[in-house]
Amino acid sequence: MTAPVVVILAAGQGTRMRSAVQKLLHPLCGRPIITWPIAAAQAAGAAKIVVVDSPERHLEPALAQFDGAVALAVQERPLGTADAVRAAGAEIGAAETVVVLNGDVPLVSAATLEALVQDYERTGAAGTIATTVLEDPSGYGRIVRAPDGTVERVVETKSPGDASELELHIREVNTGIFAFEAGALTAALAEVKAHNSQGEQYLPNMLPILREHERTVLAHELDDASELLQINDRRQLAEVTAVAQQQIHERHMLAGVTIVNPAATVIDAAVRIGQDTVVAPFTSLIGTTAIGTGSTVGPGCTLIDTEVGDGATVLHAYSNSAVIGDRAIVGPFTYLRPGTVLREGSKAGTFVEIKNSDVGAGTKVPHLSYIGDADIGEGTNLGASTITANYDGYRKHRTRIGSRVKTSVDTTFVAPVTVGDDAYTAAGSVIGDDVPPGALAGSPGVARSAQRNVEGYAERRRKRAEAESEDEGQKR
């Protein structure tokens, strides 16, 4: 198969989205809509990909991620799809095969593009149009075939009177995906005229021109109509998202991942999940999140750009740009912020927040703690309500806690401070000075003052309150 030039038409304004964001920049399962047909074209072996944008060049930032592999052409005025392809002419050059598709049909697959090109090249036609048969073809252009089965023309149905009553009964429709011989495409584009009230030059108008030049146009029928789902408004975006999400779920489940309730699970397109991992309900895996084998994630988790190792357990947790190591335990009700690294076998427990910190292997932060800008060694245990006070009002400072350290409850470390290996802290301590290895640190002193019990305190307090109440009543 010849490696084709793929032209993606994306210059429309998408006003029906009712958005300040250009239509094709809206996210679909974690990726801008425009990147979906680009990815399909790349997977299909395109020699070059050209995206046709409007003069505002809204799509240019989204194309930067492709490192120059996608060229941008500009359609100066909205004169229709044929004019949009004409705008890409300089990028087509001397290509042998050109594939044209719309940018707002993100579910088109690489396999479909490959099959279209193979069918086109096998027949030697000047052009091949991808078609499909719909139960309800309303709104689609109808394929009118000649007696020999070749494609004669496409009849639009956008306005009353565009098509005859007989043509409206045709169920085979235009998908907007074409394969052309480059030379024939260029020649026919020069002859396309606007024959409609919108004054636009439609790409299907080329088909009769090719036939006038005694060139053949054939149809390549698609079986899966879901690939043609178009996005023009947010309702259609939701419909396409549902189909794309189902495909993502099926791909992971067929690869050995258990998704307990797909209807209550969100997984972005770029997410990677290892075999025998279980994803429990009400879990969202967002962005570039990657999960190893044999882990359990959920219920009730949101992981954004997070790396999870093998055999980890993460439940009722929110994690953004963190690393959760092999066999680590997270949750419930844990917040991992960017820069957090939990090493192998470590734990971040109930109502724990960790930010920009490296927690050593086997170290436990069980509950009710805030750890920010800290480096913690291996096998350390931080008691409940351990806090690293990392901000002095002007700058952030780091806390360094060694290995096998044991902190008692309600310990606050005022950074910058370093705690040596095997050290201890006393309950209720504020640690602002470095602690030597193996030492016990506490404040205001390790030997606390003796406990004093005040007998009868509650009764005396009650009587005082009653007396105060009587005084208030007399004053009134």
Image: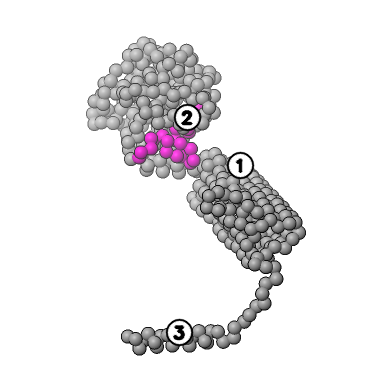
Look at the image and tell me in which quarter the C terminus lies: bottom left
Q: Which residues are magenta?
A: 19-42
Q: Amino acid at mark 1?
A: Ala
Please state which of residues 330 and 293 is positioned toward the viewer in this rendering: 330
- The local crowd at label 2, few if under 14, some if 14 to 19, many if 20 or more residues have their Cα within 10 Å, is some
Which of the two labelled residues, at mark 3 and mark 2, occupies the earlier sequence position? 2
Where 227 falls versus 294 (above or below)? above
Upstream in the sequence, badge 2 or badge 1?
A: 2
User: What SS does tag 1 mark?
Assistant: loop
Residue 167 lies left or right of residue 418; in this view the side is left
* Residue that numbered label 1 is attached to: 255
**The residue under label 2 is which amino acid type?**
Leu
Single out the mark in the foreground, 2 or 1: 2
Marks 3 and 1 sit apart, C-alpha to C-alpha, by: 70 Å
* Quadrant hosting residue 156: top left
Compute the Cα span from label 3 to label 2.
72 Å
Mark 2 lies on a secondary structure that is helix
How crowded is the residue under tag 3: few (<14 C-alpha within 10 Å), some, or many (20+)? Answer: few
Read off the residue under disc 2: 63
